[in-house]
Amino acid sequence: MTTLFHDAPAGQAASLTSRILNQGKYEAATMLRNGEQLVLMVVMPLLGLVALVATPLLDGMGHPRVAIAAPGILALCALSTAFTGQGIATGFDRRYGVLRFLSTTPLGKGGLIAGKVLAVLVALALQVALISLVAVFMGWRPPLAGVLLGIPLLILGAAAFTALGLLIAGTVRPEATLAITNLGWILFAALGGIVLPAGKFSSALEGFVQWLPSGALGNLMRAALIDSRLDVWGLIVLLAWAAVASFAAVKWFKWN
């Protein structure tokens, strides 16, 4: 944790930007060394991609299976890394006193959240590169305009899910964080519209799913990477989730 204060002249505190960058480096290195998180970040999305392309679950939707599956799996990567991975890691950092130590530094709650978002983006970039490469070998050919549109949308999704994960990790016990984030991952992935388009659900559930951050991100990624189109409603919903979750995480996050 001494990296929080590198890059500053002797006798002077590091700038906020330097503190956030150093915290982000530390968080990213920790994530990439954790075998369980690597399974969640890489193995599960890859298995999901292969399963969706190999089975007829996505047939009849007007596009090749891989064209529908790949955007949803990329959105799932954001959910896995930002929500479940960061939520669990932060929850146990609270348990073992790491966050209590951070509370004595100039990093602050906002700096901690920003550092964790940065770490998520580093891990997410690696996930996206790997998943996209596999999808391309399976025949995926997304439009360039859609790719350029999808990148900032995926970043927004990562920010929203990081804030949600930190809100849970910073307000409940670590054991409860583990249960809530894992259960949330299962529900979002299976029924939240992030992997399977909302049209695969009943009409009642379809309407509900579109209000969830998972459904909004899934719809945004599919609209961008299939049709090079911005789903305005999905953007509004995801921005609202990101803003509210970030405010709540900063306001109610507990350091111990």
Image (tube, grey):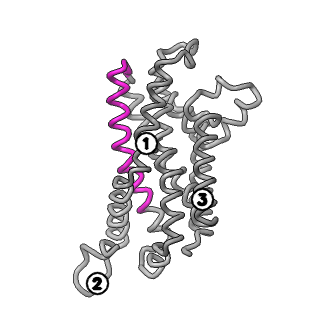
Please state the horizontal and vertical placement of residue 18, each as a whole percent of the image. Answer: 32, 69
Residue found 39% across the figure and 24% down from its top: 142
Position of the C terminus, as image quadrant, is bottom right
Tell me the number on the disc at residue 152. Answer: 1
Mark 3–mark 2 CB contact (< 8 Å) = no
Around disc 1, counting alpha carbons within 10 Å, would you say few (fewer than 14), some (14 to 19), or many (20 or more)?
A: few
Q: Judge left or right: residue 5 versus residue 171.
A: left
Q: Which amino acid, by three-letter code, is at mark 2? A: Gln
Residue found 23% across the figure and 84% down from its top: 10
Closer mark to the observer between disc 3 and disc 1? 3
Residue found 22% across the figure and 81% down from its top: 9
Tell me the number on the disc at residue 177. Answer: 3
Q: Which residue is mark 2?
A: 12
- Quadrant housing residue 151: top left
Position of the N terminus, as image quadrant, is bottom left
- Quadrant housing residue 24: bottom left
Dot 3 falls on a residue whose secondary structure is helix
Give the vertical position of 233 relative to 40 (above or below).
Answer: above
Please state the horizontal and vertical placement of residue 104, each as a whole percent of the image. Answer: 45, 82
Q: Earlier in the sequence, mark 2 or mark 1?
A: 2
Assess whether residue 221 is covered by the magenta stretch: no
Residue 171 appears in the figure: yes
Magenta region? 115-141
Tell me the number on the disc at residue 85. Answer: none
Q: Earlier in the sequence, mark 3 or mark 2?
A: 2
Label 3, label 2: how many angstroms apart (C-alpha)? Answer: 37 Å
Q: Earlier in the sequence, mark 3 or mark 1?
A: 1
Dot 2 falls on a residue whose secondary structure is loop
Mark 2–mark 1 CB contact (< 8 Å) = no
Helix, strand or loop for the magenta stretch, by majority: helix
